[in-house]
Amino acid sequence: MTTPRKAGAFDIRIVIAGLIGFYGAVLTVMGIVADTAADRARTGDVNANLWAGLGMLAVAAAFAISARLRPVLVE
């Protein structure tokens, strides 16, 4: 009888957290660095890239925390 092990890097939540986190980081940087008046005029004076990036970073953190607190056990 073998003891169960954690799925680790093969847990799909880690992959999703990495992808969403990467895109969120890119959007956050673009929202900070490349925010123009024309972009704000199209979005109703809201920095859409910044807020979308921060939201994606929060979702990525939630996925990573979920994977850390409740790991998938593999036989």
Image (cartoon, helix red, strand yellow):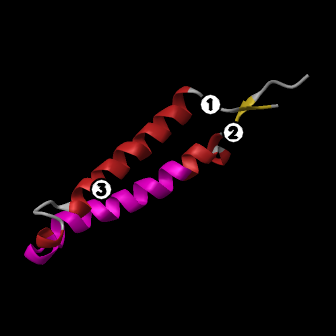
- Could you tell which of marks 1 and 2 lies nearer the N-terminus? 2
Q: Are marks 1 and 2 in contact (CB under 8 Å)?
A: yes
Q: Residue at x 48, y 40 (%)?
A: 64
The magenta span reads 16-39
To which quarter of the image does residue 46 belong? bottom left
Q: Amino acid at mark 3?
A: Ala
Q: Residue at x 12, y 77 (%)?
A: 38
Q: Is residue 35 visible?
A: no
Cα–Cα span, label 2 and label 3: 30 Å
Q: Amino acid at mark 2?
A: Ala
Read off the residue under disc 3.
Answer: 52
Answer whether residue 25 is magenta in the image.
Answer: yes
Cα–Cα span, label 1 and label 2: 7 Å
To which quarter of the image does residue 7 belong? top right
Instruction: Rate crowding at label 1 as few (under 14), some (14 to 19) or many (20 or more) other CA atoms within 10 Å.
Output: some
Q: Position of residue 44 (x, y in %)?
A: 13, 63
Instruction: Rate crowding at label 2 as few (under 14), some (14 to 19) or many (20 or more) other CA atoms within 10 Å.
Output: some
Q: Quadrant of the C terminus?
A: top right
Read off the residue under disc 1.
Answer: 71
Read off the residue under disc 2.
Answer: 7
Cα–Cα span, label 3 and label 1: 28 Å
Answer whether residue 32 is magenta in the image.
Answer: yes
SS assignment at label 3: helix
